[in-house]
Image (spheres, rainbow, N blue to C red):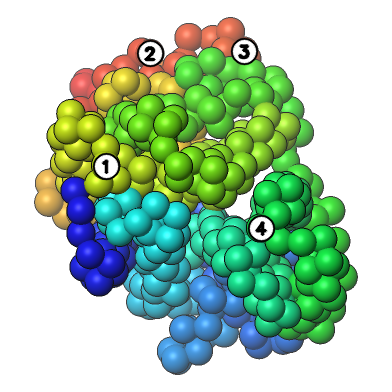
Amino acid sequence: MSITATRARIGIAFCAFLFILQAGFSARQKSLTWDEPTFIVSGLSYLHTGELTLNTEAPPLPQFLAALPLLLLDLHPPDYASDDFTPRTQVRFARAFFTANPDRVDVIATLSRIPFWLAGAMIVWLIGSFAMRLMGPSAGVSSAIVASLSPNLIAHGRLATSDALGALGMLAAVYAIHIVVRHPHWKGWMGAGALGATAVLAKFTALLLGPITAILLLVEVRRRTVSRRQLLHAVAPFLAGALAVLTVGYLGEPWLIFKGLSRIYQNTTPGYQFYLLGQVYDHPVWYYYLAAAAIKTPLPTLVLLATGVWILRDRGEARDVLLYCAVPFTILMVVTAFDQANLGLRRILPAYPFAFVFLGVTGLAGACRPCRHLHLALLVGCALVAVSIYPNHLTYFNVMAGGPSRGPYLMDDSNVDWGQNFPALSAWQRTHHTHEPLKLFYFGTLPPELYGIDHTPIPNDEIVSPQPGVYAVSAHQLVYIRKTARLAGADVDWLDRFEPFDRLGGSIYLYRFPQ
């Protein structure tokens, strides 16, 4: 397909708006996830006290953004005199704040998430703009369409956490490098440094911009796009821009970044068992994120990427596209082999925008006719995926993996269950008006009562021998039971033993045991 630049910009802007609609309407149907209460309340403490005390293992920018809209509300403030106002007990401290504001939980969630919906829309716009700059208008629109329909980007771009914001920062920094190398100016270099530092303030993964930038500039020097002399003159403004942003972001104490880096893995549970493709491991799995990307990326998107490689093999655009897409993507994916957490696909979310920019090549006007037909069919496939998974984007698994219902049989944590489906459970209780007591084993940081859920906790002995009644079990806890069963050699694996009669939002499994 071939379109004008003006129409392409309109199309890209529409895709960004489409992202906001999907993120906003779906987020309003989801409870606050595990990390969000801590991010929100930590940000409030930063704004109220001027001290970065609580959630220091995460950079401050997403926490500031999550808390800033709450200054518009009249809320009971956090109790900073509490003994729980410490990093070690930050989850309990955050829970106390929401318990003190029980009627405002939904309003707090919506306002705190709005900045991140806008950041997600900005990702889509930058993806389209970058692809358009590298390959032309048609490519830009194609990339923006796929990005705006991505279940993974929507799932995390609607939450008040650091993942999508980090992806935005890294993409913006690389985009800035591409521009300033071709139009060198000290202001441009200062802006590139500032954008890189902003990305680090969003997510520590952005520190990989160091080697990424070095490789990009080395190749550009060899191409003679920019000279060594120009790069030497760029060092001072680049570092000045980065240092200025870090200083502002850390409230005048940029060295606090090292404190945050030192705490990244401090909250790791001793003896934690890792889980991938239904198997339990006592060590991180080096190919965990490759497997996650393979089974949680829509099949039409994977085919578009493969088609892009085929189309680009003999085109003149290959040099810039491969350099600015493949280098960041490859470095991000290779480094994940050494990740000690294996927590979820969200850890590699910054790699996705570069893949989306790259697959814009399938929309190039000069592609073969069968390729153009396949391209349009795959775009329709991406739209069908987005419609089919709404509003449960976090639980998405592609058809090769067996679909969303296979989630806890394959992966755990934020790949499936991050505590996001309390509203669905509350609605189920209201709709069914059951007189049976609901027994609940849930994963989340907030009390279920805040969402109107009437329940009793499941006793440990009933995990082994369920009694008559209705049980609601979070997918994360089902995997925990499976891990415990295999560690102890006991036959208590609910995923193998029992069949749920319903799956609420794809992450809360309902079981009924008869008399």
To which residue does mark 4 refer? 225
Which of discs 3 and 1 lies nearer the camera? The answer is: 1
Query: Looking at the rendered structure, which numbered label has been put on residue 480?
Result: none
Q: What element carries label 2?
A: helix
Residue type, label 1: Gly
Q: Earlier in the sequence, mark 4 or mark 3?
A: 4
Q: What amino acid does circle 4 point to?
A: Thr
Q: Is residue 171 left or right of residue 197?
A: left
Residue 245: x and y, percent? 72, 78
In the image shown, does 187 or 225 lie closer to the viewer?
Answer: 225
Q: Position of residue 19 (x, y in %)?
A: 29, 61
Q: Are dots 4 and 3 in contact, CB under 8 Å?
A: no
- 113 shown above or below 71: above
* Location of residue 430 by image quarter: bottom left
Viewer-proximal residue, 501 or 113?
Answer: 113
Q: What numbered label is drawn on residue 488?
A: 3
Total numbered circles:
4
- Residue 313 found in image quarter: top left
Q: Which callout, 3 or 1, points at the residue further toward the start of the chain?
A: 1
Q: Which residue is drawn at 58% across and 18% down?
A: 280
- The amino acid marked with disc number 3 is Ala
Q: Where is residue 88, by image quadrant? A: bottom right
What residue sits right under mark 1 in the picture? 366
Q: Position of residue 126 (x, y in %)?
A: 43, 63
Secondary element at image label 3: helix
Crowding around mark 3 (Cα neighbors within 10 Å: few <14, some 14 to 19, many 20+) is few
Which label's residue is closer to the chain start, 1 or 2?
A: 1
The CA distance from mark 4 to mark 1 is 26 Å
Q: How far apart are marks 4 and 3 (CA)?
A: 61 Å
Name the disc covering residue 496, or none: 2
Who comes first in sequence, dot 4 or dot 1?
A: 4
Specify the amino acid type for callout 2: Asp
